[in-house]
Amino acid sequence: MTSSSTGSCGTSETRSFRIEIKHDLTLRPDPVTAANEQRRTSTTYSVSVSTCDHGVTASYYGRSFFTSSPTYHDSAHHYLHTCS
């Protein structure tokens, strides 16, 4: 499975933009199954990440955020059988 995201800011500064694929678990914190980060000086950012998560069948979602900000964006949750 793959998750991709883009982000933008009004001014060019050195920032880290991170994306994570998270395993959606009920009544527990959602673990990160894969992550990738782009650090550069820019106003636009684009990052993607892929994982097979050992062939698990479960609900997953992508989360993207600037590491310097408390806000984030989550994708829709998808129930998948991942590659093995």
Image (cartoon, rainbow, N blue to C red):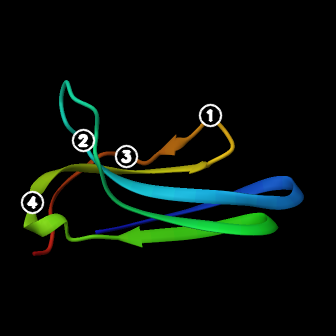
Q: Residue at x 30, y 45 (%)?
A: 77
Q: Kindly identify the amino acid type of the residue bearing the numbered disc 1.
A: Pro
Labelled pair 1, 2 in contact (Cβ < 8 Å): no
Q: Residues within 10 Å of mark 3 (few under 14, many from 20)?
A: few
Seen in the image, is 10 located left or right of residue 35? right
Q: Kindly identify the amino acid type of the residue bearing the numbered disc 2.
A: Asp
Q: Measure the alpha-carbon separation of dots 3 and 1.
A: 20 Å
| Position in image of residue 31 (x %, y %) | 28, 45
In this rendering, the answer to whether 70 lies above or below 45 is above
Which comes sooner in the sequence, label 4 or label 3? Answer: 4
Which comes sooner in the sequence, label 2 or label 4? Answer: 2
| Position in image of residue 28 (x %, y %) | 21, 29
As helix, strand or loop, the secondary structure at mark 1 comes to loop
Mark 4 = which residue? Answer: 56
Which comes sooner in the sequence, label 1 or label 4? Answer: 4
As helix, strand or loop, the secondary structure at mark 4 comes to loop
Q: Which mark is residue 24?
A: 2
In this rendering, the answer to whether 43 lies above or below 75 is below
Q: Which mark is residue 76?
A: 3
Which comes sooner in the sequence, label 3 or label 1? Answer: 1
Labelled pair 3, 1 in contact (Cβ < 8 Å): no
Q: Kindly identify the amino acid type of the residue bearing the numbered disc 3.
A: Ala
